[in-house]
Image (tube, helix red, strand yellow):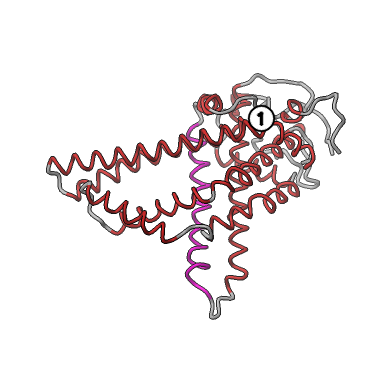
């Protein structure tokens, strides 16, 4: 289904101000709602990106829900339940981390123990679930990016075209994801090595253990900001690898350049998504893993409900990253009045080839 053509919001400003890009009565795109002034777009906030994400979700609701049910929900269920995680291995790694922390001069306070345990669980879970991340989750990201691209092109989601496009761009998406994982693992490793080294030096100099704790907290706060920026760059790089003909380190460099000047918006988006997913994870931990009513019947409906909530939060996070990419892109490009066509279809489906039904 193709809607009426008009100036592409991907190349013009996609800011909406007080008007919706969709008509509330029939959930269709309003051509007159787009603002073509790039200077107004520069002030687009994370809240406005969230509002636009919701409008896009309303328009292609069936497509996004299908992606969530088929691709995101299985990964969410395994992540929340930790079904594949060997808790004995987590315990052994936690003990080794505590030994390293103790040898560096840091006192084994409760929050230090909890941090080591959470880090161990995250490391084991990420390693065990990596095959799912690089298949289902990565396919869901590509499909969501395609759906958002179709919405901006005033077209409906087409599963057949999405499959054809994904087969053509799959290698560069995986290549970019592997580089993003390398960046994240390298950043965490450098942080831990730096923290242990500096804490050991402070202990040798003669600083008290409590001072080492405060120093570790301060360093952890600065590293959290750095890690958040790295995650944003990696997320946008994944979007770029889907929509543009770049991959790997080129996509990461392109991402860091593209979000320059709008890092604060990206941080707010990341903070909101992290809070939302962490809240659902906490509910699952408390309501499903810890508590149950009598015979445990509450888990029968609370578990699937929380998995759906977590999957929806992941969907919104991917959509907001994509909208954020388009917002940065439209601000950096000049206005274009070409015929509106999805970026992925224009680049990956040859005009001479028969149209996929």
- Across and down, in percent, residue 190 comes to 35, 36
> For the point 62% across and 63% down, which residue is it?
304
Q: In the displayed image of the protein, which residue is found farthest to the left?
A: 206
Mark 1 — residue? Answer: 243
Q: Secondary structure at mark 1?
A: helix
> For the point 30% across and 46% down, which residue is it?
217
Q: Quadrant of residue 197?
A: top left
The stretch drawn in magenta includes residue 277: yes
In the depicted view, which residue is nearer to us: 140 or 280? 140
> For the point 51% across and 59% down, which residue is it?
82
Question: Would residue 24 appear left or right of 68 to someone viewing this image?
Answer: right
- Across and down, in percent, residue 77 comes to 59, 58
> For the point 60% across and 35% down, which residue is it?
174
Residue 316 higher or lower than 16, as above or below: below
In the depicted view, which residue is nearer to us: 209 or 185? 185
Q: In the displayed image of the protein, which residue is found farthest to the top?
A: 334
Question: Would residue 184 appear left or right of 331 to someone viewing this image?
Answer: left
Magenta highlight: main SS = helix
In the depicted view, which residue is nearer to us: 304 or 331? 304
- Across and down, in percent, residue 23 comes to 76, 42
First to last magenta residue range: 263-292
Which quarter of the figure is the N terminus placed in? top right
Instruction: Check disc 1: other Cα within 10 Å, few if <14, some if 14-19, many if 20+.
Output: many
In the depicted view, which residue is nearer to us: 172 or 6? 172
Which quarter of the figure is the C terminus placed in? top right
Question: Would residue 212 appear left or right of 142 to someone viewing this image?
Answer: left
Question: Would residue 95 appear left or right of 31 to someone viewing this image?
Answer: left
Q: Quadrant of residue 45?
A: top right
- Across and down, in percent, residue 162 comes to 75, 38
The stretch drawn in magenta includes residue 44: no
């Amino acid at each position: 289904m193709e809607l009426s053509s008009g100036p592409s919001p991907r190349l013009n400003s996609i800011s909406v101000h007080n008007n919706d890009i969709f008509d509330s009565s029939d959930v269709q795109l309003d051509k007159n709602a787009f603002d073509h002034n790039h200077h107004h777009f520069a002030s687009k906030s994370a809240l406005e990106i969230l509002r636009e994400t919701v409008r896009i979700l309303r328009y292609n609701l069936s497509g996004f829900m299908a992606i969530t049910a088929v691709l995101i929900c299985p990964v969410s269920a395994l992540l929340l339940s930790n079904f594949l995680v060997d808790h004995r291995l987590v315990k052994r790694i936690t003990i080794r981390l505590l030994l390293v922390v103790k040898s560096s001069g840091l006192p084994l306070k409760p929050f230090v123990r909890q941090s080591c345990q959470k880090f161990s669980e995250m490391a084991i879970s990420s390693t065990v679930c990596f095959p799912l991340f690089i298949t289902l989750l990565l396919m869901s990201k590509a499909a969501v990016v395609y759906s958002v691209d179709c919405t901006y092109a005033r077209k409906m989601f087409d599963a057949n075209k999405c499959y054809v496009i994904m087969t053509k761009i799959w290698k560069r998406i995986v290549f970019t994801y592997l580089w993003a994982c390398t960046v994240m693992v390298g950043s965490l490793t450098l942080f831990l090595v730096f923290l242990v080294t500096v804490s050991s030096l402070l202990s040798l100099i003669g600083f008290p253990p409590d001072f080492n704790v405060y120093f570790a907290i301060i360093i952890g706060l600065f590293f959290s900001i750095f890690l958040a920026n790295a995650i944003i760059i990696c997320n946008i790089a994944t979007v770029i690898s889907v929509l543009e003909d770049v991959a790997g380190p080129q996509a990461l460099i392109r991402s860091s350049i593209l979000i320059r000047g709008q890092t604060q918006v990206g941080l707010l988006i990341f903070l909101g998504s992290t809070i939302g997913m962490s809240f659902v994870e906490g509910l699952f931990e408390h309501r499903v893993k810890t508590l149950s009513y009598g015979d445990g019947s509450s888990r029968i409906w609370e578990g699937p409900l929380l998995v759906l909530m977590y999957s929806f939060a992941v969907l919104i996070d991917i959509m907001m990253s994509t909208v954020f990419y388009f917002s940065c892109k439209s601000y950096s490009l000049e206005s274009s009045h070409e015929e509106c066509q999805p970026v992925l279809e224009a680049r990956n489906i040859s005009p001479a080839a028969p149209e996929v039904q």
